[in-house]
Image: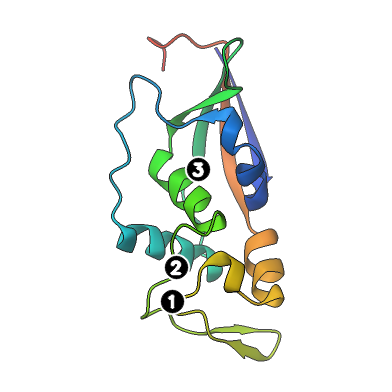
Amino acid sequence: MEIKQERWPLLTFKEYENDINPNPTYQRSSVWKPEQKQILIDSILRKIDIPKIYLRELKDGSFQYEIIDGQQRMRAIWDFLGNRFSLSEEAEELLIKGEIYEVSEKPYNELEAAIKIERIHKYSLDVVIVYDATEDEI
C-alpha cells in the first residue's frame, strides 16, 4: 500500500464525478440532509478549511477511484456544482474585493462570476490517494 497527498481544485472533483465510485461496499449510502450540504458549501464560500478526502485508486472496473472517506462531502460538492440544491435562506452575504454579494437561496448557476471565481474555482481540497491497497487494508 502506498499513500500520496495532493491538493485538488474544487472543480476537479466535478470533472471526476463519473470516475469516482462514491459507494464502495464498505461505505454507507448518502445520509446528509440538505441543511448539512448547505453548511458545507457555505464553509467553502467563506474559505473555511474542510477535512481531507481519501480515495483509493482502482486498477480495473468502470471507476478510476473509490471514496474511502469524505463521501458525504463529495456528494454535497457534486450536488451543488450540478445545481441540485440552493444555499440556505439564512446564508449571509459575502464580501469579495470590496463588493457585497447576496447568496441566500441561490444554486451554483445563479452565483455571480466573482463568487464562482474567487470562492469556488480557487478553492482547493487536500486529497489522500491510496494506491495498491486491498479492501481489507482499507
Residue type for callout 1: Glu
Q: Which residue is mark 2?
A: 86
- Label 2 Cα crowd, 10 Å radius (few <14 / some 14-19 / many 20+): many
Instruction: In the rendered view, tell whether residue 37 sits above or below residue 47.
Output: above
Q: Can you say which quadrant of the picture contains the N terminus?
A: top right
Assign a secondary structure to mark 3. Answer: loop
Q: Can you say which quadrant of the picture contains the C terminus?
A: top left
Q: Which residue is mark 1?
A: 105
**Residue 20: assigned label:** none
Q: Nearer the viewer, residue 130 or 72?
A: 72
Distance of mark 3 from mark 2, alpha carbons?
Answer: 24 Å
Q: Which residue is mark 3?
A: 52
Q: For the point 50% across and 43% down, which residue is it?
A: 52
Residue type for callout 2: Ser
Q: Position of residue 93 (x, y in %)?
A: 50, 85
The answer to whether the residues at label 2 and label 1 have Cβ atoms under 8 Å apart is yes
Mark earlier in primary sequence (3, 2): 3
Q: For the point 48% across and 44% down, which residue is it?
A: 74
Mark earlier in primary sequence (2, 1): 2
Q: For the point 28% across and 55% down, which residue is it?
A: 33
Name the quadrant containing residue 34: bottom left
Q: Nearer the viewer, residue 26 or 124?
A: 26
Distance of mark 3 from mark 1, alpha carbons?
Answer: 27 Å
Name the quadrant containing residue 40: bottom left
Can residue 87 be seen at all in this image of the molecule? yes
Assign a secondary structure to mark 2. Answer: loop
Distance of mark 2 from mark 1, alpha carbons?
Answer: 5 Å
- Which label lies toward us, 3 or 2? 2
* 118 lies left or right of 127: right
- Which label lies toward us, 3 or 1? 1
- Label 3 Cα crowd, 10 Å radius (few <14 / some 14-19 / many 20+): some
Q: Position of residue 110 (x, y in %)?
A: 59, 73
